[in-house]
Image (cartoon, rainbow, N blue to C red):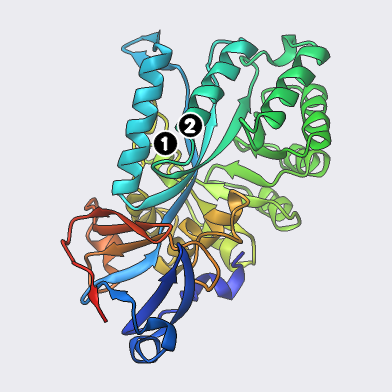
Amino acid sequence: MRRGAALNDLGIITDGSVLIRDGKIVSVGSARRIENLKEARDALEISAEGAIVMPGFVDPGLQLTLHSNNGSSGKRRKMVDFGDESLGLMRACLQHGTLNVQIKANAGTGDLRSDLTVLRQLAEIGNNPVGMIRTWRVSESTGGEHASSGDLQEMLATLANRKLAQFIEVAPECSEAFGQRVWEAAGQLGMGVNLLWPGGRAALLERLITNAGPHAVWCPSSLSSEECSALLASRSIAVFSPGSELLNESGGDSVRKLADSGAAIALSSGYDVNNTPSFNMQMVIALAVLRLHLTIEQAIVAVTINAAYATARGELIGSIECGKRADLIVLNIPDYREIPRRFGINHVGMVMRDGNIVFNRIRSRASAS
């Protein structure tokens, strides 16, 4: 996890190369050094001249539900349509450079069995075309206050045992007593806990962080100094979604102050089919710079290595380091600082997942080195 001054360090290697074997990164360094390695003699070479090679984006905040708004009324989609649309979304994420996602899902019906069916459908999609971490969103309408302890325990046990969800997210609209039941049950089953925080009473935020020990807290960008202090004093990762606030007046410097003060911050798209139908993490970088006043370096770190840690996968993905999975993207721009300036363009020319080229718009061919 990068904090403080480390948020501005991208570890740039000019004229660099990456050596990959069996889907893992073996060596990283200058092109001249890598080419002279014994292990590289029989390697295939893929040119990325004039472009940027960087870790694939990680989106820790895609929100999916069976219900979609159609005008003023809600419409429930069929499960088969939900599965097809979710798979299509994952493919679109890959084409825009996002190789790992955390999906926060429920049915939106207030029925635990429907929630279970939704998570099963997502589990069937699995890690193809992108890596998927699933989170069960528990809110007042999700069985919530009306669920018995036995039903809740059975639901959580099923999710954990069948690996249908790795995290539980509790909305603050639930009572603290109910939240405590969920947190304790999830902890006993080895499941992680996340918190959705809408902003407001700093004392409540501090109490929730203390009682739940959330891995990550999804926050609005306009936080009070007291809320910032509560996040700074915790081990939780603060996740912001600038795209979800694009049409609001919220913003300000609280996110930048948190970042400069040493807080653990990450960024997500906040994708929601009803409210925030955007999943492009390049757009998230631009909005973080333009609206949250982060530096471009801070924004890039927040959508790669820090976002990976927000999904509890930081040891495997999110940076170009030896031993990590070769989840890489090639951007068709000469300088990373062009991302916010060339606003709204998909710069992804190539996507490599686990060392395999799975998307290629630059038509670069592998050749013997």
- Place residue 360 in its image quadrant: bottom left
Residue drawn 43% across and 57% down? Answer: 354
- Counting from the top left corner in percent of width and height, residue 353 is at 39, 55
Q: Tag on residue 63? A: 2
Q: Tag on residue 58? A: none
- In the shown orientation, is residue 155 left or right of residue 273? right
- In the shown orientation, is residue 157 left or right of residue 282? right
Residue drawn 26% across and 67% down? Answer: 338
Q: Which residue is farthest front?
A: 42
Residue type indicated by callout 1: Tyr
Residue drawn 44% across and 69% down? Answer: 21
Depth order, front residue of 336/85? 85
Q: Tag on residue 271? A: 1
Judged from the image, the secondary structure of the residue bearing numbered disc 2 is: strand
In the image, residue 352 sits, relative to residue 104, either above or below, namely below
- Place residue 170 in its image quadrant: top right
